[in-house]
Image (spheres, helix red, strand yellow):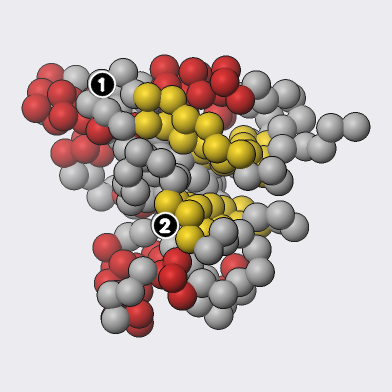
Amino acid sequence: MRKTRKIVIGDIHGCYDELLALLEQIGPVSGDILIPAGDLIDRGPKSEQVMDFFASRPNTVAIMGNHERKHVRGILSPGQEISRRQFAARYNQAREVMAAFPYFYEDNDVIVVHAALKRGLPMPAQPEEILCGTMAGERQLARLLKNRPWFEEYRGEKPVIYGHKVVGKTPRIHNGKTFGIDTGACHGGWLTAITVPEFKIYSVKAKENYWSRIKQRGPQNV
């Protein structure tokens, strides 16, 4: 009998077409768990469609990213204002959905967070700001680690999959234990996923640099 897969997806940022192409490549079945690792929205052209897709699919655990947290807390820079206008009358409903996102996923095979971990703490004790990558969380880690990357200090037993910072065209894998999978889809890069427990990598190329085009238009022209 085929074991249930966890399908962990890097920062989607409203790249709905690429999400569908990626899932077509992976071929999830109903029992598989989809785990978008935060930053589902903002910057790309179809944040509303991305949210609707995951909200309507059973066996989905969407992780809180720093972009979702900004919306939940009402911190709207131009990027968030663009998404607010994309959602239009459904914006408050979307905020309620995002407010329920957990800050991490953990099972026997893997840990998934949006941004980073603080060494030596169990998952329930991890600071939310570090897990989702707020500026305050990043400053805290920088002071603690003297600007060394957190993943170089990770000593946990379980592999960790995370996103948040673009790592290039392919995932950044450190010591076979940490997997950075933000490969810059909204910037014209790639949308990447890893299936667990086999840790197989899938990716699709973005159609264009969406964020470059969208931010030039600005919130007034959504």
Residue 139 higher or lower than 94, as above or below: below
Q: Give x and y (percent) for residue 12.
A: 41, 34
As shown in the figure, which amino acid type bears the numbered disc 2?
A: Ala
Numbered circle sitting on residue 100: none
Q: Mark 1 points at which residue?
A: 208
Q: Is residue 81 left or right of residue 70?
A: left
Q: In this picture, is 77 found above or below 119?
A: above
Element under disc 2: loop
In the picture as drawn, the residue positioned furthest to the front comes out as: 175
Residue 132 in picture, x, y percent from top left: 42, 57
Of residues 67 and 85, the one nearer the viewer is 67
Please indicate, yes or no, whether residue 117 appears anywhere in the rendered image. Answer: yes
Whether residue 13 is situated above or below residue 136 in the rendered picture: above
- Do the residues under discs 2 and 1 have CB atoms within 8 angstroms? no
Of 189 and 135, nearer the camera is 189
Q: Earlier in the sequence, mark 2 or mark 1?
A: 2
**Mark 1 residue type:** Glu
In the rendered structure, find residue 115 and report the number of the disc placed on it. Answer: 2
The residue depicted at 15 percent of the width and 24 percent of the height is: 213
Task: Write down the quadrant of residue 2 in the picture.
Answer: top right
**Image-quadrant location for residue 133:** bottom left
Q: Where is residue 185 in the image (x, y as percent from the top left)?
A: 34, 32
Q: Where is residue 37 in the image (x, y as percent from the top left)?
A: 49, 45
Residue at 28% over, 75% down: 147
